[in-house]
Each structure stands twice: as structure tokens, then as C-alpha cells.
Amino acid sequence: MHPLLVSRARLGTYLLGWVPIALLLAGIARSQGWNWLEATSLALPLCLLGALLFLGTWYLCRAMPLQNTADELATQAAAWGTAALLMGGLWAGLAWLLARMLTWLPGLGALPQRVKLALPVITGLGILLYLASVALSYLMLAQARALEAERKGAELQLLAQESELKALRAQLNPHFLFNSLNSLSALTAVDPVRAREMCVLLSEFLRRSLGLGERRLVALREELDLARAYLAIEQIRFGTRLRLDLKVEPATEPALLPTLLLQPLVENAIKHGIAALPDGGTLVLTSELVEGHVILRVENPRDPDAPTPQGLGLGLRQVRQRLLGRFGSRARFEATSLEEVHRVTLVFPLETEP
Amino acid sequence: MRALIIDDEDLARAVVRQHLEPHPDVTVAAECANGFEALKAAAQHQPDLIFLDIQMPKLDGFEVLELLEAEGKRPAVIFVTAYDQHALRAFEAHAVDYLLKPFSKERFDAALAKARLLVAAQPAAPPPPAAELAAAARQGRPLERVVVKDGPKVTVIHLDRLDWVQAQDDYILLRTEGRNILKQQTLASLETQLDPARFIRIHRSYILNLDRLVRVEQDTKEHRDAVLRDGARLPVSRAGYQRLRELWEDA
């Protein structure tokens, strides 16, 4: 669709743009000794015709996008020059036809004679106006492309964010889920009360994590609730192998942070720490407030025989990226792997819901 | 029939035990919470059948099986795991059974029935080596560690601590942290499981951890040496040198 034809306002603005051109044309005619009646009765309809005629340029421009190389540009310029000559001639021809038709009106009998003399000027003006309409069309096309690109960019960014969150939700790892269900399967026979407890915990964990995935920012309190539900399930699975030491300063609970930032840390601590040790160990989770910053730390024992991890795994890289993406240089991410302890620390400014 | 239940989670072992209750011909000789216990129990009880989890601390299920194999033991195996089902589908081709956690009574009984047949009659084809199963389950991902059993002692060598490997007839000599460890395996079979970007066959008899390489020196026209970080020198064959150069050119 032609951008000038999508709304009346735009078409009106375009046609208004032709008024000064009509005035210019009339002025030129006056200076050549035409009277006012002759000048305006030719200039106004001629410009209206021109306005409509040159609208078509946009379609040609869209069909022939501007080229990049000098050679191609030169060919294109030649094509446009030829087109401009033809259109200038066509416009002058229209002026002459118009003049012939207007002789029917009283007082305009001399018009064809006057137009005949002015044909070179009208042709020249037509050429210039046509070239201007070419430039205008390309300008509009470029602007439309820029807008489109911007819209697409925004859309892509949105998609990326969504898929990122989706991926995080999918990280609710199936291994955990199936092992939990297996524990549940065992409990149904030996301890139905605990089995029911496990069902409730599992539902709570799933409900919370599904709910969190919809949002970009959450209060630390909610992340902690999710982690507690998760750890309660893992405690049933691992029994005495998993010991917990949670120290949360209440002042840090309303702190806002990107969704599902804590969960991967806790899952890693179990998967690479506790689960890899025959006798398990203690998972330490602390959250404290120091000078307006939340210091969130997850610490777990690790198998000293396992190689020290080189660099961060995908999960931790994502956590760091999302933390820094939100808080920039005001946040800090630290992962340390000592001989027997693995520790991840997140430091970020305390920001709460207004 | 004597069985072992090997799983690091109490409740997971309990499920198997519960499902075994209606089968009085199967006695649970021992329950093991990790691979080391499993090896000890296997030596003590000579089980006909093992229920084996895959992801366990220290030694995984495949490594347990490999170490049993090294002692000439090969009980019937039912893998019991929450491991990726796509990875395990490869097992079907090898007639090795697996139960995906959680599983039904029917599925359990079917697996047990298959195992009974296997124990009663000698199978037509020998079961596939554990290393082969492990490789199938890894689905193309390279090996991360090597396990060796020397008498009662089990050594786990993480590959970033492995300097090089030398072929010695049917054995391989693994060089790690200043020690030499022998394992019954061929160099070629190990080579196929290693990450080709980290370990290079520099010679008919040597695989080198690239991380240990400092430079290659040309002694004579036909003879090159790899100089390692600790100053050791290993021979580099012409084909080995070619492989190194290809790797450098790609990098």
C-alpha cells in the first residue's frame, strides 16, 4: 500500500505540499505576462494532475531498490533521468491539452498560445518535480524499512527473552522429576503419610516454578520459597545425605531479582555436590544485607577427587548473564571452586517493589 | 537366584525390593549405596542378577559393570534409572534391559522374566562390554574418566589428569600425576572414546593429552619428539605429526 494513500490526512498533507508549487508555477506565468485568471486556471489543475501522476513513482521505486555499487547506481540514475525526461514531456503535454480544453471558458482564449511558448519551462519544472518525487519515494521507503527493522528487532528481543525463560522453565530437570516420582512410588507402600506429604511438596514446587516462569522479576522471598520446596523434596530423596543450613536475613526477602536465578544454583549444589558424595553433606544458603546490597550465597561440599570445573557451566553462565543484564556493574557474580567446597555468590543492590 | 540392588538412594532401592517381594526365588543378597560397596558385595555374594542405577557418586553404573567385567564377572543386569530414555534406547539392540524410574509392576516383572531366562540358559551371544554400553549411552559425548581395578584397589582417573597413554600388548599404560597405571584394554578402543580435540594419537603406541604438549622437536630427518610440560619426551610418528598439524591448522 502506498504510504501516502493509507490515510486521508497523509494524502491531504501531500496535496497541500503541491500548493506552493502551483503558486510558483502561477508566479512564473505572471512574470511572463499572463493575467491572473490564465495563470491560476492552468497552474492549479496542472499541479493536481502532477500530484496524482507522480504518486506512481513510489511503486517504481519500490520495484527498483537503490543499488549499492557505483556501476549499478549509475545505470539506475540513467534510468531515472530518462524517466524524468519522459514524465516532464508528458506533464507539458498535459498542460497543452488542458489549455486547449480551457479555451471553452470565457477569457481563456489565448491560453494555448501562451502554453505553447511556456512548454520548455513546464517540461523543465516537470523533470525537476519528477526527480523530487523519486527522492521522496526513496526516502519514504527507507523510513518504512527502518521502522520495520526496529519493529522486528523489538519482536526478536521479546522472543529471545521469552525463549530464555521457557528454556529456564524447561530446566526443571526431568531427572529430578522422575527420581522424585520414583521416591514417591516407594513411599506409597512403606509410608503413605510421607507419600502424601511428598505429593503436596512436589505440587507446590511445580506450581511455584510454573508461576515464576511467567515473570521477569520476583522478590527473593518467592525464589527462596521455591528453593525450600525443592530442597524439602530432595531431602526425602537423599535422606540423611542432604543436610541443610539456611540463614536468611528477613530484610533481604523483598529484594527484586531476575526470575529463577537462585534455583539453578541450588540444583547445581545438589547435582554436582551432594549427589556426587557417598555420604552427602551440608548445603549452606545464606542471604544477608550489607550496605544496601544483598549478598546471596550457595555453598556445597564437593568431591575432592573430581576435577575442579574449568570455567562456568551453561547454567551458571546464564545466571551471571541475567544478573549482570539486570543490574549491570552494580552487581557481582562469583563462583569459587576450592578443593572440597564449591561456592557461588551473588551481590546485587536491594531494590524493592514500589 | 541371588540379586544385588545398587542405587545411592534408599527409597529407590526400596522400590526394587518391594517389587521383588512376590518373587521368592530371588533373594536380595545385598543392597549397595555406591559402586565401591557394590564391588565388595559382588565379590562376596557372586550375584546372578544386579539391579543397577547409572548416576551414582564416585563410580557410575557403567563403571561398576566394567570393573566387574575386569574380574571376569558378568551377572545379568537390569539398569534402573531416571537417565535419558533416548540414550537407553540403544540398549535394546544389545538385549540389555532397563527400567525407567518410576516403573510399573508389569514392566518390572517383564524385565525380571527376561533376566531369569538369561541366567538359566547361557545366552547365544555374549553380552556387550560395559564400555560399549556406556559409549552408546553417552551418545557421542566423549569419555570423562577411566576406571582401573588393581586387586582390591579401584583408581578413577579424570581425563584432565591423564598425561598420556602407551600401548603395551593387550594392556594400556596410563600416565597420571607421576604414576603409571596398567589397564587391560587396547589403545584403539580407548582412542575411539576420547575427545579428539583433547587427545591425539601421536604414534602407533601413544595417545597424548594435548594440554601437556609444549613443542615438537625434529631430531633427525625421520624422527620427531613431543616435548611435554614435565620435560618428558614421546616419539611422534609421521602420521601423528600430520594429525597434530591438521589440528593446529584448524585452530
Image: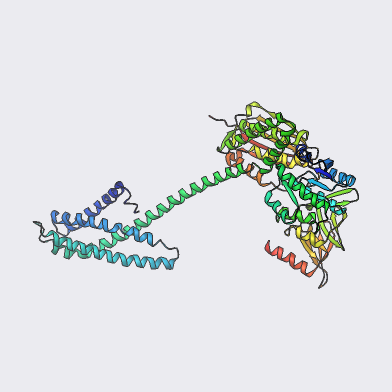
* Residue A228 vertical position relative to residue A103 in the rendered view, above or below: above
Name the residue: 24% across, 62% down: A91
Q: In this figure, what is the number of numbered marks?
A: 0
Name the residue: 84% across, 48% down: B48
Percent position of residue B101, x then y: 71, 43
Q: Is residue A38 left or right of residue A125?
A: left
Percent position of residue B66, x then y: 82, 52
Question: In the current view of this chain or complex, which residue is farthest to the left?
Answer: A106
Closer to the camera in the image, B200 or A200: A200
* Residue A95 vertical position relative to residue B238 in the rendered view, above or below: above
Q: How is the image coloured?
A: rainbow
Percent position of residue B235, x then y: 83, 65
Closer to the camera in the image, A234 or A340: A234
Percent position of residue A284, x then y: 73, 33
* Residue B155 vertical position relative to residue A177 in the rendered view, above or below: below
Closer to the camera in the image, A177 or A48: A177
Q: Is residue A25 left or right of residue B141?
A: left
